[in-house]
């Protein structure tokens, strides 16, 4: 499997996500017939995996989680639907020495 960065082909989607969500970073990838949208925000990271023709395979989920989130899918909250999977993980803020 190979993730191909196709963000430049989806500029309208990226601009809308940046304008209407708390995300400060959005990337769009192709995984064959499957599209992956990765968003990074101050408090969380979201990954949306979409395939309108079939259900998302567990191997695709594991691959995307490993490549983009640098972890395993074992302890993540994953929402499965007919044509998409949504993964959201909280981002811990570093503790300040001045607290």
Image (cartoon, rainbow, N blue to C red):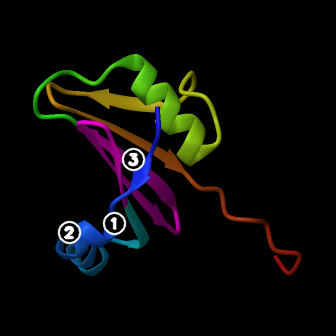
Image location of residue 91, percent across then percent down: 59, 55
Name the residue: 61% across, 29% down.
72
Q: Secondary structure at mark 3?
A: strand
Magenta run includes residue 39: yes
Mark 3–mark 1 contact, CB under 8 Å? no
* Horizontal side of residue 14 vs 58, given as left or right: left
* Horizontal side of residue 86 vs 84, given as left or right: right
Mark before the other along the chain sequence, 3 or 1:
1
Name the residue: 33% across, 19% down.
57
Q: Which residue is disc 3 drawn over?
A: 47
Q: Secondary structure at mark 2?
A: helix
Name the residue: 50% across, 26% down.
62
Q: Quadrant of residue 20?
A: bottom left
| Of marks 1 and 2, the one in the foreground | 1
Front residue of 13/42: it is 13
Front residue of 50/40: it is 50
Mark 1–mark 2 contact, CB under 8 Å? no
Front residue of 36/47: it is 36
Q: Which residue is disc 1 drawn over?
A: 7
Q: CA distance from mark 2 to mark 3?
A: 14 Å
Mark 1, Cα crowd under 10 Å, few <14 / some 14-19 / many 20+, is some
Q: Which residue is disc 2 drawn over?
A: 13
**Residue that extends furthest to the right in the rendered view of this protein:** 97
Mark 3, Cα crowd under 10 Å, few <14 / some 14-19 / many 20+, is many
Mark before the other along the chain sequence, 1 or 2:
1
| Of marks 2 and 3, the one in the foreground | 2
* Horizontal side of residue 48 vs 97, given as left or right: left
| Of marks 3 and 1, the one in the foreground | 1
Q: Secondary structure at mark 1?
A: helix
Q: Which residues are magenta?
A: 28-49
């Amino acid at each position: 499997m190979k993730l191909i960065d196709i963000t430049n082909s989806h500029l309208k989607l990226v601009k809308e996500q940046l304008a209407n969500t708390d995300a400060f970073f959005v990337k769009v990838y192709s995984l064959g017939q499957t599209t992956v949208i990765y968003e990074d925000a101050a408090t969380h990271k979201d990954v949306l995996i979409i395939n309108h023709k079939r259900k998302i395979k567990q191997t695709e989920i594991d691959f995307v989680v490993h490549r983009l989130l640098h972890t395993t899918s074992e302890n993540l909250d994953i929402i499965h639907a007919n044509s998409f999977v949504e993964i959201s993980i909280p981002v811990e803020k570093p503790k300040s020495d001045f607290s």
